[in-house]
Image (cartoon, rainbow, N blue to C red):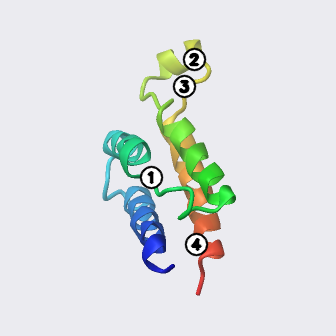
Amino acid sequence: RNMSRAWIRTITKYFEDFLEGEIGIEGFCAGYERWWNFDIPTDAELTGNERVLLEKVFKVVTAYSPYDLERNEITIYKSGEEVREIVEQVLSVLKNQNAA
């Protein structure tokens, strides 16, 4: 059971590195999208709630745009601040749920 939870440590570290500025936003978004598409844990390794949380991050990072004008015209696009906010929220919940 513990082995299947290793993804928690990986993704919380990735979120923390981004929030602390170790990873730039473009790299973070591209890396998270790749993780979601190729490396996301199986349903057996995730609770339903975790999948929902991780999908929320996915939806925001795939809609990220660094361009103000573009975001003004296409309202589904997200700002860097919105990416940070969802990552902070999801990281907090994952840490609380997985506290020893």
Which one is earlier in the sequence, the residue at label 3 or at label 1?
A: 1
Along the viewing direction, whichever of 19 and 68 lies nearer the viewer: 19
Name the residue at the top extreme: 73
Residue 81 locus on image (x, y percent): 53, 42
Which quadrant is home to the C terminus?
bottom right
Q: Position of residue 99 (x, y in %)?
A: 60, 81
Q: Is residue 94 above or below residue 43?
A: below
Q: How many numbered circles are shown?
A: 4
Q: Give me the C-alpha separation between circle 4 and circle 3.
A: 28 Å
Mark 4 vs mark 2, CA separation in Å: 34 Å
- Position of residue 4 measured from the top left corner of the image (x, y, whole percent): 46, 71
Task: Please name the residue shown 59% across and 67% down the image.
Answer: 94
Q: Which mark is residue 40?
A: 1
Name the residue that disc number 4 marks.
Answer: 95
Mark 4: amino acid: Lys
Q: Amino acid at mark 3?
A: Tyr
Q: CA distance from mark 3 to mark 1?
A: 23 Å
Q: Are marks 3 and 1 in contact (CB under 8 Å)?
A: no
Residue count near mark 3 (Cα–Cα under 10 Å), binned few <14, some 14–19, many ≥20:
some
Instruction: Classify mark 2: residues with Cα within 10 Å, few (<14), some (14-19) or many (20+).
Output: few
Outermost residue toward the front in this view = 44
Per the image, the residue denoted by label 2 is 72
Of labels 4 and 3, the one closer to you: 4
Task: For marks 4 and 1, give the CA distance.
Answer: 18 Å
- Residue that label 3 marks: 77
Amino acid on which disc 2 is placed: Asn
Q: Earlier in the sequence, mark 4 or mark 1?
A: 1
Q: Which residue sits at x=53%, y=21%?
A: 71
Marked residue nearer the N-terminal end (2 or 1): 1
The residue closer to the viewer here, 50 or 82, is 50
